[in-house]
Amino acid sequence: MHREDKGRGLRTRSIHAGERPDPVTKASAPNIVMSTTFAVEDASGGFSALEMADKDAFVYTRWANPTVRQLEEKLASLENAEACVAFGSGMAAAAALFFRLLSAGDRLVISDVAYAGVAELVRDTLTRLRIEVVPVDSSDLDELRGAVRARRTRLVYVETPANPILRLTDIAGAARIAHEAGAELAVDSTFATPVATRPIDLGADYVVHSLTKYIGGHGDAVGGAVLGRAEPLADLRQDTAIHLGGVLSPFNAWLIMRGMATLPLRMAAHADGAMRVARFLQDHPKVMSVCYPGLPSHPQYDLARRQMANFAGMLTFRTAEPLRVAQQLADRLRIIHYAVSLGHHRSLIYYLATDELQKSSFRLDAEHLARYRKAAGEGIFRLSVGLEDPEDLCADLDQALA
Ligand SMILES: *Cc1c(COP(=O)(O)O)cnc(C)c1O
């Protein structure tokens, strides 16, 4: 983080951190630097990112790009992190962290409710590389401690709130447990955003984001990022962004940065809208249950209040005959899009059948599957409450559920 950002509020940093008027043209809005290569003044500079004397110099866009760096600095400022590396997607960011930190024989302890792509990656690919993967219910710190105490744990990876059942993990508690065992903690904070929770302030070593969701916020750019301390992030950049090559395009960096300028304002409106829609659904005769971290009925409401300065816009609900209702919603909703993804200004809804999800998740044992079913039953509707008028969203749901 730049010294001048210290002490400034989140709204100011969302707009100004990482950006300065162009030194040549004085343009106030950032330029998009699409150039893949940069004219080099010092001809003795070498030919490999590993050999470069000045690691901050721009040479080749896969190594570093001015527009992507602006985004990285802005995000690092918001997360109170020393450094940030942007990637072409949230999956590329998560994969980079796993490939950088884990080797054959290492143990990864991971929350057993996680984004399906991450669950599939660690379950299928990391185990093939002889990395031991141990899924745990990380909302239960005793269970987490039991799994981590065993030797060889290199990394604990949690998602909070976890997709899709909005289960929370106590980040400070998980960090203590990981560090006592000599492991590091990474937190996928995509659902929370730095407006709600700053995992590094709570002791996490790494933060992972899908920038595709709230941070970009407009459903028009896929991106990802890993944040943490400067030294390990420099190694991560070398090993993964530069060598695996899944970097973010400057155009997407620019779009995401444009979205980030309004992140604190959008998150306030997402949370306000979600609370109103959650209350509406709670009272709706066709709805059996609602899960939202801002409702006292959330099983971890106390932790939510302690750990989240904003409850964000994600909620889930259950109905009878959910498959039939899902088709009805897809046919009848006029404002809300029946579509995957989340965190956009447009409201999005999707039905996630528990049996289907289990195929693309960890193969949970009977006890953990029972815990999942307690939260999700045979399936849940995941609603990403957008920035439309909450009354219009409630009316749209009402007519579609009727
Ligand atoms: C979407 C998502 C990802 C993956 O991000 P992409 O940008 O789609 O690759 C990872 N974690 C969570 C929690 C997500 O919601």
Image (cartoon, helix red, strand yellow):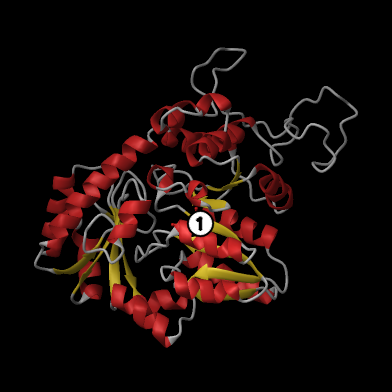
Foreground: 386 or 164?
Answer: 164
Q: Is residue 241 above or below residue 182?
A: above
Q: Residues within 10 Å of mark 1 (few under 14, many from 20)?
A: many
Circle 1: residue type: Val
**Residue 51's image quarter?**
top right
Q: Is residue 355 above or below residue 319?
A: below
Q: Position of residue 60 (x, y in %)?
A: 73, 36
264 with respect to 116 (left or right) = left
Q: Is residue 367 above or below residue 286?
A: below
Foreground: 359 or 272?
Answer: 272
Q: Position of residue 282 (x, y in %)?
A: 15, 62
Foreground: 347 or 282?
Answer: 282
Q: Position of residue 146 (x, y in %)?
A: 53, 76
Pointer 1: what residue? 187
Residue at the extreme bottom: 366
Q: Is residue 220 above or below residue 339?
A: above
Q: Position of residue 362 (x, y in %)?
A: 49, 76
